[in-house]
Image: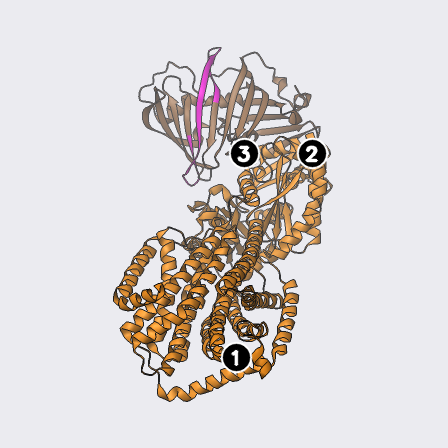
Chain colours: A brown, B orange
């Protein structure tokens, strides 16, 4: 899951960046080495229009296993959901994600089957798709223009989904030319109205990888936003394949 | 004498005065054209600093509580076919695209999630996005709906023939244009099979705020026309009739003009202003002309200047006294907490004073310019009949004093009995015709769904007590209360709260087994279910039922009526749980427009009763000062009191509820009743001094004031009877009650008040009668 999040950012690449097409730019962003596995603490802050906040702390592990990318996460806080865990397997081909949930109070692992990629991630303003669970061919990409954002040169790419019933009519992404990190992204709903804005507030180079450590997604229509902060990031520590199992879900932290 | 000089001046300067009035009126009219604006947002009427409203407004913010427009799609063959489902989808999307509606505020089967459980897991799906067409897919959808209590009976009727779309809107977006656009948009989707109905509180509220004044606009000219005609038959002079009406016209124009100058919008109650001013304004003119005619009959050779001067000399006092007392009565409405009513009081008072000014300036100026009304000789025999009638009537009243007293006593007892039955109704829906579209649609939706009226109960543990509403004990209590209210009141269709989500998740996570459709055992379990819901459903759904740190909860009841009795019955049962909740540190509060309407109506009534008592006191004091006798002050208040009592008594017996319109009528009772009393007492005083004989005084007064009062009553009653043909029921009630008030004021003044004047030996000691 987290690796997916990072797909939005781009890897350091020495590729020839002259006259890239929209598709090529997005491809570079999507397909870049982000490490085999990763472990981190995610602090998610949900902020409603009144300014009230809900804070969730999650311990998460992700691993790219070739055609499948697996992630598992455990709630650290709030206390009443501690050890609630969630597992996601995302496939490179057209298969839908496999998802499981474990509720300690129920002491049962349940599969979640969802026909919609528009589900919100942990009640946040991010959908699973927003977090990068999106494939290159699912949209047609067009380079609109180039412009500066925060003093850095960016490509501005518009992506229009092939599936006309998709939850977004289009997205527009600002990608830093230098790093291929998508620093800003606008999401337009099925009626073409601006729905959400994603802003990357901070990214750091960790063990040679550019990792977004602070991002914010703001839902304009609902006046609701989510901040995500990553800490204690460890990359390529050799997380075991066995970590991503139903049994491990019930183990807790 | 100052007044004498003033009268001379008025008579001399009749042209400048008339032209000045016209110019000022033109200025006011210009401002009206520029500034007058109708205020239809009912929230603007509510006192913003009242604790109930402050809390409700806050709660509306917390939970996004808004009134919903309900669009019902009906297909007698059932909704599970491609055509109906497509209509549902298209309409949902069309509503979402309207500028007045936030996309996320539209709910229907098309937007809803269907979360179901199996032995192994949890299924989160939309009911449909692409319209299913195969029989299997349609059947599956039907099954999904019927097994999901979040949709079954809420979004689709239990008989499967009606589906609804709920579009919540902000309070201030409703306009006639928007409503018509919704109606025309939805009508486009109607076919032979598919019927579409539009209902909901915004529609009812908006239509009412527009329909009442619109109907008034249509009816008032007819009222005026009838008054003009009847007035002509009373005064027998076109000139007099037109001048009297011009007093009414200018006073209404000035009152509205001043509001426009001060940038005050026209509220629904403001439309009562012309009603009041018409009823009150004609009185001065009738009394002035009545006096003039009597004088001319005795002094056939008097010049117009002499006659006008005489009229002013003798009549300025009662005209001024009646106007001042009436104005003060209206100004007492300032005690109301409701802003539009304060404005109504102040500007009606201003209008009454303006009417006084015009009566004492325009009528004399008019007589100077257009000449005296002709006294037709052939009418003399008729005069004699009225004369004789007045004499006989006065004599009978005096001779049969005990009759008046007994009848009055009986009427008072009856009225007080009737008043016990009076009830307050804040219902908007019941202001419409039973067979009107709006009522029928509402009934239709109420038959198929929970109800069109929502009552929001806010359970508040205080922000510092986070997570209270994750406690199973608390949730179970809420569930018990929800069920108790639903089961004991037919009027409550269903209720909805966080408990429904928790129960649903518990069931889903336990393979959809019905026995798990209940609150789970531990707080952690509740918390985890809620987290799971947030992860799988639309998190915003939860925001509508519980606040961010689980210290406040919103329970929504759907009622099938917005009648105050229904709402109060619901509140009654809920309040029985107040103690149980208190033990858990939870306070009970209410929110939403239905509740605010209820509180608001109470506020209006409270204000009305306060101002009624206050103005009665002021009237007694003013009359006591004017006539220099407390006794007279008290006697003068009798017709008013009786009028108010009868008005409320009749409402009680006829089951007419008190509402914002009918409550205001007590002001009319005072305004009109006092006019009659003052004119009558003033004449009685003058005649008593001249004749020194009780019977003669009564007869002379009856001939003079009595006649004028009768004319006045006939004119206004005839005028307001016109409202009985109004299409808007509240305006009909208004017409009937104004007429009734006019009649009782008139009857009370000429009978019981005369009797009391007679018995109290006011102005005449008993000597003469004893001699007789």
Q: Position of residue B427 (x, y in %)?
A: 56, 57
Tell me, for residue B471, which label it has, or none.
Answer: 2
Tell whether B456 sits left or right of B381: right
- What chain does badge 3 belong to? A
- What chain does badge 2 belong to? B
The reply to whether residue B80 is visible in this rendering is no
Q: Compared with residue B472, is residue A63 higher up or lower down, i.e. above or below?
A: above
User: Could you tell me which secondary element the residue under label 2 belongs to?
Assistant: loop
- What chain does badge 1 belong to? B
Neighbour tally class for label 2: few under 14, some 14-19, many 20 plus, Cα within 10 Å: some
Disc 1 marks which residue?
Answer: B693
Q: Are marks 2 and 1 on the same chain?
A: yes
Query: Which of label 2 and label 3 is nearer to you?
Result: 2
Q: Looking at the figure, which quarter contains the N terminus of chain B?
A: bottom left
The Cα–Cα distance between marks 2 and 1, rounded to whole angstroms, is 85 Å
Residues shaded magenta: A186-214
Looking at the image, is mark 2 or mark 1 earlier in the sequence?
A: 2
């Amino acid at each position: 899951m987290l690796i997916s999040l990072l797909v939005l950012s781009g890897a350091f690449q020495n590729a020839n960046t002259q006259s890239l097409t929209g598709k090529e730019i997005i491809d570079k962003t999507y397909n870049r080495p982000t490490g085999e596995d990763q472990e981190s603490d995610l602090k998610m802050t949900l902020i409603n229009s009144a300014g009230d906040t809900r804070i969730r702390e999650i311990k998460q592990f992700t691993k790219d296993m070739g055609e499948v990318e697996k992630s598992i996460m455990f709630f650290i806080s709030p206390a009443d959901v501690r050890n609630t865990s969630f597992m996601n397997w995302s496939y490179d081909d057209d298969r839908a994600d496999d998802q499981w949930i474990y509720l300690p109070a129920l002491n049962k692992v349940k599969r979640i089957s969802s026909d919609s990629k528009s589900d919100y991630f942990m009640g946040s303003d991010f959908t699973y798709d927003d977090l990068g669970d999106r494939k290159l061919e699912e949209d047609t990409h067009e380079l609109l223009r180039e412009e500066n954002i925060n003093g850095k040169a960016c490509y501005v790419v518009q992506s229009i989904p092939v599936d006309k019933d998709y939850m977004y009519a289009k997205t527009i992404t600002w990608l830093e030319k230098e790093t291929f990190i998508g620093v800003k992204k606008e999401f337009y709903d099925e009626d073409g109205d601006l729905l959400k804005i994603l802003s990357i507030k901070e990214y750091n180079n960790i063990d040679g990888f550019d990792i977004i450590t602070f991002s914010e997604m703001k839902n304009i229509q609902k006046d609701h936003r989510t901040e995500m902060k990553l800490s204690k990031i460890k990359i390529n520590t050799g997380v075991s394949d066995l970590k991503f199992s139903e049994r491990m879900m019930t183990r807790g932290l | 004498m100052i007044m004498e000089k003033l009268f001379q001046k008025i008579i001399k300067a009749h042209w400048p005065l008339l032209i000045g009035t016209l110019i000022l009126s033109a200025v006011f009219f210009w401002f009206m054209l520029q500034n007058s604006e109708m205020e239809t947002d009912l929230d603007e009427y509510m006192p913003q600093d009242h604790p109930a409203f402050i809390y409700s407004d806050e709660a509306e913010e917390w939970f996004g509580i808004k009134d919903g427009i309900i669009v019902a799609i009906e297909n007698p063959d059932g909704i599970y076919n491609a055509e109906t489902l497509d209509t549902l989808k298209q309409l949902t999307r069309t509503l979402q695209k309207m500028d007045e509606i936030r996309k996320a505020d539209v709910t229907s089967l098309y937007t809803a999630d269907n979360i179901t459980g199996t032995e192994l897991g949890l299924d989160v799906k939309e009911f449909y996005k692409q319209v299913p067409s195969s029989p299997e897919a349609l059947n599956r959808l039907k099954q999904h709906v019927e097994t999901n209590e979040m949709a079954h009976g809420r979004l689709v009727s239990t008989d499967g023939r009606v589906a609804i779309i709920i579009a919540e809107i902000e309070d201030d977006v409703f306009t006639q244009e928007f409503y018509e656009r919704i109606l025309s948009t939805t009508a486009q989707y109607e076919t032979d099979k598919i019927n579409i109905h539009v209902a909901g509180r915004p529609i009812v509220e908006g239509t009412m705020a527009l329909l009442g004044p619109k109907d008034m606009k249509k009816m008032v000219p007819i009222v005026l026309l009838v008054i003009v005609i009847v007035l002509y038959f009373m005064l027998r002079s076109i000139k007099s009739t037109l001048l009297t009406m011009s007093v009414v016209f200018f006073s209404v124009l000035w009152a509205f003009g001043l509001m426009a100058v001060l940038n005050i919008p026209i509220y629904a109650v403001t439309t009562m202003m012309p009603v009041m001013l018409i009823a009150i304004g004609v009185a001065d003119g009738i009394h002035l002309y009545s006096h003039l005619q009597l004088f001319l009959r005795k002094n056939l050779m008097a010049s117009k200047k002499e006659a006008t001067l005489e009229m002013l000399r003798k009549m300025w006092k009662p005209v001024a006294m009646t106007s001042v007392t009436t104005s003060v009565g209206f100004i007492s409405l300032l005690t109301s907490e409701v802003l539009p009513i304060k404005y109504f009081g102040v500007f009606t008072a201003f209008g009454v004073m303006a009417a006084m000014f015009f009566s004492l300036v325009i009528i004399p100026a008019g007589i100077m310019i257009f000449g005296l009304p002709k006294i037709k000789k052939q009418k003399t025999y008729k005069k004699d009949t009225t004369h004789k009638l007045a004499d006989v009537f006065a004599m009978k009243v005096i001779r049969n004093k005990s009759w008046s007293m007994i009848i009055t006593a009986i009427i008072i007892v009856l009225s007080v009995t009737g008043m016990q039955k009076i009830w307050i109704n804040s219902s908007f829906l019941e202001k419409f015709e039973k067979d009107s579209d709006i009522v029928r649609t509402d009934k239709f939706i109420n038959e198929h769904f929970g109800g069109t009226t929502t009552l929001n109960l806010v359970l508040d543990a205080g922000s510092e007590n986070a997570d209270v509403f994750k406690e199973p004990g608390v949730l179970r209590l809420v569930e018990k209360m929800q069920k108790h209210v639903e089961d004991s009141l037919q009027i409550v269709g269903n209720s909805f709260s966080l408990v429904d989500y928790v129960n649903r998740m518990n069931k889903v996570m336990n393979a959809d087994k019905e026995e798990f459709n209940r609150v789970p055992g531990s707080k952690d379990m509740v918390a985890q279910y809620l987290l799971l819901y947030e992860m799988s459903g639309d998190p915003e759904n939860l925001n509508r039922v519980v606040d961010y740190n689980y210290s406040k909860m919103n329970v929504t009841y759907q009622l099938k009526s917005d009648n105050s009795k229904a709402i109060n019955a619901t509140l009654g049962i809920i309040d029985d749980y107040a103690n149980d909740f208190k033990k858990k540190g939870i306070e009970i509060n209410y929110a939403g427009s239905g509740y605010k309407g209820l509180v608001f109506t109470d506020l209006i009534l409270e204000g009305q009763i306060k101002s009624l008592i206050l103005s009665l006191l002021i009237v007694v004091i003013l009359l006591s000062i004017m006539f220099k006798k407390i006794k007279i002050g008290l006697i003068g208040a009798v017709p008013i009191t009786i009028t108010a009592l009868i008005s409320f008594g009749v409402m009680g017996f006829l089951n007419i509820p008190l509402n914002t319109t009918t409550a205001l009528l007590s002001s009319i009772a005072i305004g009109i009743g006092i006019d009659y009393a003052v004119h009558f007492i003033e004449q009685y005083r003058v005649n008593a001094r001249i004749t020194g004989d009780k019977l003669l005084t009564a007869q002379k007064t009856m001939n003079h004031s009595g006649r004028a009062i009768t004319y006045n009553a006939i004119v206004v009653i005839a005028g307001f009877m016109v409202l009985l043909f109004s299409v808007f029921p509240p305006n009909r009630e208004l017409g009937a009650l104004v007429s009734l008030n006019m009649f009782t004021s008139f009857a009370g003044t000429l009978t019981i008040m005369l009797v009391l004047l007679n018995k109290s030996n006011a102005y005449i000691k008993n000597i003469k009668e004893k001699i007789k």
